[in-house]
Image (cartoon, coloured by chain):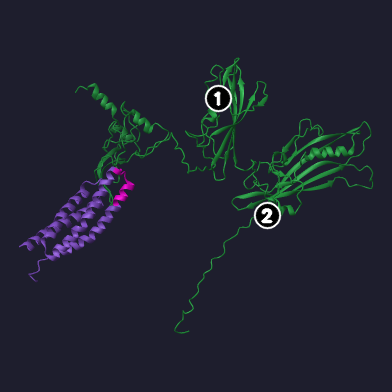
Amino acid sequence: NNSSQLSSLPLQILLYLNGIYYIFYFLATLAMIIYKSQVFSYPDDFLAPDLAVLFLMAILEVPRLYLGFKGNLTEAEAPLGLSLGLTVGSAVLCVYLLLWQTYVLWADTLLNAVLLSAYGLESGLKVMAIAAFVS
Amino acid sequence: PADTPDAAQARARSAPAPVTDVAKLCVCDLLVAQCDINCCCDPDCSADDFSLFTTCSVPVVTGDSQLCSQKAAIYSLDVEANPPERIFKLIDQVNPSIFCIHATNYKEATYLKSPEIPTPENFDQLLDKFGGATFSAEPDLDLDTDAQNPPDANETYRYEYGVPVQTEDAFLRLPSPVVSSWCSDANPAGFLVNQATKCIRSVSVEKCDSIQALSMLFYINSSILAVNITVQSIVVQSQNGMRTSLNSSDVLRLPMVLDGLCINAVLGVNYHITHTDTGEIIEAAAAFVLGAISKEALSIEQSFEISFTQENTQPVPLSGNPGYVVGLPVRAGFRPQGYPFPAGFLFAPLALSSNKHSQLTILQSTSTQDCLAAQGARAPVLFGYNMISGCKLRITAAMKCQPLAQTLLDVLKGQSFPEYVASFGNSQAQDVLDWVPITQLHISEQIISNTLQSSCQIPVALGIEVKWTKYGSLVNPQARIVNVTATITTTTLKQLPSGRERIIPVTSSVVFTDISSPAEPSYKAWPTINIKLPFDFFYPFV
């Protein structure tokens, strides 16, 4: 165990798994929104915000993960800090999809809960990594 | 609390709130303040009533089953107990599906939408939206049903059979009787649908010029989408029924009161629409019959007709398309003189005239039954209908043979017996091969014995045999005439002693015979497997 290595391995693993899981999450949530719009009464006024939140979260995810990887591997706290900020934003959107969507299916609850817990764990690890880099 | 009038009004403006508590919902509770039989959820029923029930007609009341967990009210009868009693259970029903609705932030998600209650403020808007015969589910679409868009210069409209002919504001209307004989102005004219209707309109001479349907303007006012309706001809019908055609048909004659009569009232309109073969209307003309209405008349009969003609063609009524339709007249024609017989087929189009006058016709029986007084009444031969008709011929001694034979031949065959019959119902006169020549046969009834003198043969029977076959596909066979034979049967006219008379019957008949051969279904060839190995398949070894 080389003590000069400050990069966090758990964070790296978590970021990697998060990337894979997010692709599945995005496709599943999009498919479920399409299913809901066909089966239930889903007026356009309610459909638009839900879709907007989902796509916004997808757009945020890419820089978030990239900055996370970069910051962790180069042991730089600036990208990691930025990634932490984006994680907070993504977590807020995830909470929206968990609680304030028009129709929250049981599968929705499951997926969002997993994602939220992943975000929480990531945030904790990032804070620890930043502390390690700074000191 | 005292209810103010405003509060009461506000309550009346909103629909009653929907009941959503499953314990209070009862679908079978129909009678007010009375117990419904076998309705276990009825609050009006007492325990004594429940003991008389046999089963519960509504066993379970639930909300939307899509929800993950919902309340359900279960009603059942315990028949074991004495007396039977009703069991009411309120349970939580769980939907095991992974796609059950866990929560919803949309209030009206699982309920039907409450309709808007009309108030003086939103009445007009609601009437616009829902006042018509139909309304759309999407509230954003603005359906403009009144005005038709005027056509662009380059855009053309193509009609299909039966589609109403559009005019600038609505459709071209052909007044026709609906339910009763009174005229209704709401019947749209369909494209290529030739119609002729007669209906009665109530009139009064005093309001003569204010009744729109009596004025010419009403019928030519609407222009069929860039094609104006022109006045083709005006015929004025007098009181006794005599019709005179006017020379100048461009002067618009409007109804007016003159000498106690209402003149220039429209008694009949005949629309002629010309179209191209691609379905565009290029011309429209109307021929009017104007007449006078007397003071005593309370109603007049108007007749309307519309006919469609393709441009550059003669309007020939088809008897089928392409095969003959049972009941339509058999089309026939002549070959004009001067064409050499077989060569004419190749070099010059045979202009077979096929108008009404040279249809295939047979003698029509009259009430007098006298052949010589028949006056040429003829009936058209309708495809598929075997017909027989006849008359009686009174022969006196004074009658000469030859003129009698010629007269009878005219009576049997008519003035212009055609030479060719159309093979299909829509055969064009230019297509020579689509016409079948009529074969004429002569049969003599009596064998001429050794007496050769004064053997006068007079025709007494004409039999037309039309042989037809089914042509085309198995599922939609078309009738096609293959052979027409006209057989004249003659008999010897024996000289009568003077003063004596003889009556002989003369008959003519038409028989349609189906000579179609049984259908042969054809099958597709068996698919062959076409495998060819490339020539260097066995490369190292060959």
Q: Which residue is mark 1?
A: B215
Chain coloured purple in this rendering: A
Q: Quadrant of residue B84?
A: top left
Which residue type does callout 1 highlight? Ser
Task: Name the amino acid type tagged 2.
Answer: Ser
Q: Residue at x 57, y 43 (%)?
A: B276
Dividing the picture into quadrants, the one containing residue B53 is: top left
Residue B508 is marked as none
User: Of label 1 and label 2, which has the lower sequence position?
Assistant: 1
Q: Are marks 1 and 2 on the same chain?
A: yes
| Secondary element type, mark 2 | loop
* Structural crowding at the residue carrying mark 2, measured as other residues with C-alpha within 10 Å and reported as few (<14), some (14–19) or many (≥20): few
Q: Which class describes the residues within 10 Å of circle 1: few (<14), some (14-19), or many (20+)?
A: many
Q: Residue under label 2, please give it.
A: B517
Q: Position of residue A120 (x, y in %)?
A: 14, 56
> In this view of the protein, which residue sits in the foreground, B273 or B45?
B273
Q: Is residue B272 visible?
A: yes
Q: Quadrant of the N terminus of chain B?
A: top left
